[in-house]
Image: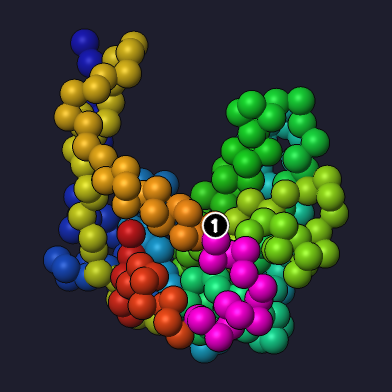
């Protein structure tokens, strides 16, 4: 007999008020709930790209990092390094080198790096270890009123290495912006039903859909060529390039 699992309904969870269209995690800024039920945290967390003016203090950030160090890592190596970035000039430098445009409005972020000297390059277990840390960080930060965004729209990895003077043994995995929520979050429905993504024993090709190969190839080549341009040229092209960037509205969450 199958176990009866709890059904989740946003209107019945008590951690974040819900109006039927909007979640209001901004209330967590005044009343953080680090003991929020895990299901509530998972279902109410959304990516935030704009934050309140108040900065997250060092003590709070260190508390988050200490808890996230319980995240799983390949072979329990625990080889994270975090570069906390709160220098406006450095954030502007990342923006000018054509990172995600909303980064210009960010006051705090961190670059997660992980030791890439592993014998399992085939499965890039250092990237998996870094990803587990970021996921844990986003859920826990949400519970105390801190929104975040996992950013992969960055310059080439070699360029990021130079900007941050990263040791050759470490790979930058992703940049994470964070800050206190400003107010409400519009709920964006999930794109798929679980039954559409679960396959049993073998990969099923039924119902697969893809974007145009030509379109993907064009964007891949264009991106490669664009980031090969010297930074000073990209700075001049930024205002033209931004129109082709994925558009995000004020506090749109996915």
The residue drawn where x is 72% and y is 49% is: 171
Query: Looking at the image, can residue 68 be seen?
Result: no
Q: Which of the image's four quarters has the C terminus?
A: bottom left
- When the figure is inspected, residue 77 is found, relative to residue 157, above or below; the finding is above
- When the figure is inspected, residue 133 is found, relative to residue 2, above or below; the finding is below
State yes or no: residue 57 in magenta: no
Position of residue 79 in the picture relative to residue 51 (left or right): right
Position of residue 242 in the picture relative to residue 115 (left or right): left
Could you classify mark 1 by the number of other residues whose Cα lies within 10 Å: few (under 14), some (14-19), or many (20 or more)? few
Position of residue 232 in the picture relative to residue 46 (left or right): right
Q: Secondary structure at mark 1?
A: helix
Q: Which of the image's four quarters has the N terminus?
A: top left
Please give the residue where the numbered disc 1 appears in the rendered image.
Answer: 224
Name the spot of residue 59 as percent of width and height, x first: 71, 71
Position of residue 68 in the picture relative to residue 140 (left or right): right
State yes or no: residue 237 in magenta: yes
Question: Seen from this angle, which residue lies furthest left?
Answer: 20
């Amino acid at each position: 007999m199958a176990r009866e699992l709890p059904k989740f309904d946003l209107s019945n969870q008590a951690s974040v008020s819900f109006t039927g269209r909007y979640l209001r995690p901004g209330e967590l800024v005044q009343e953080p709930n680090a003991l929020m039920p895990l299901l509530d945290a998972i279902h109410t967390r959304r990516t935030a790209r704009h934050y309140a003016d108040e900065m997250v203090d060092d003590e709070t950030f260190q508390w988050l990092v200490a808890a996230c160090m319980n995240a799983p890592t390949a072979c329990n190596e625990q080889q994270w390094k975090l570069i906390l970035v709160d220098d406006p000039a450095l954030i502007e430098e990342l923006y000018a080198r054509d990172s995600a445009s909303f980064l210009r409005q960010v006051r705090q972020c961190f670059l997660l790096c992980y030791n890439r000297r592993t014998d399992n390059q085939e499965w890039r277990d250092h990237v998996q270890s870094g990803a587990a840390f970021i996921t844990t960080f986003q859920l826990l930060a949400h519970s105390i009123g801190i929104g975040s965004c996992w950013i992969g729209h960055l310059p080439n990895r070699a360029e990021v290495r130079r900007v941050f003077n990263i040791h050759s043994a470490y790979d930058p995995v992703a940049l994470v912006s964070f800050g206190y929520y400003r107010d409400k979050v519009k709920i964006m429905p999930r794109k798929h039903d679980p039954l559409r993504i679960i396959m049993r024993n073998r990969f099923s090709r039924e119902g697969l859909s893809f974007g145009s190969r030509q379109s993907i190839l064009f964007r891949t080549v264009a991106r490669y060529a664009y980031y090969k341009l010297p930074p000073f040229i990209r700075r001049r092209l930024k205002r033209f390039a931004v129109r082709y960037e994925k558009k995000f509205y004020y506090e749109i969450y996915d």
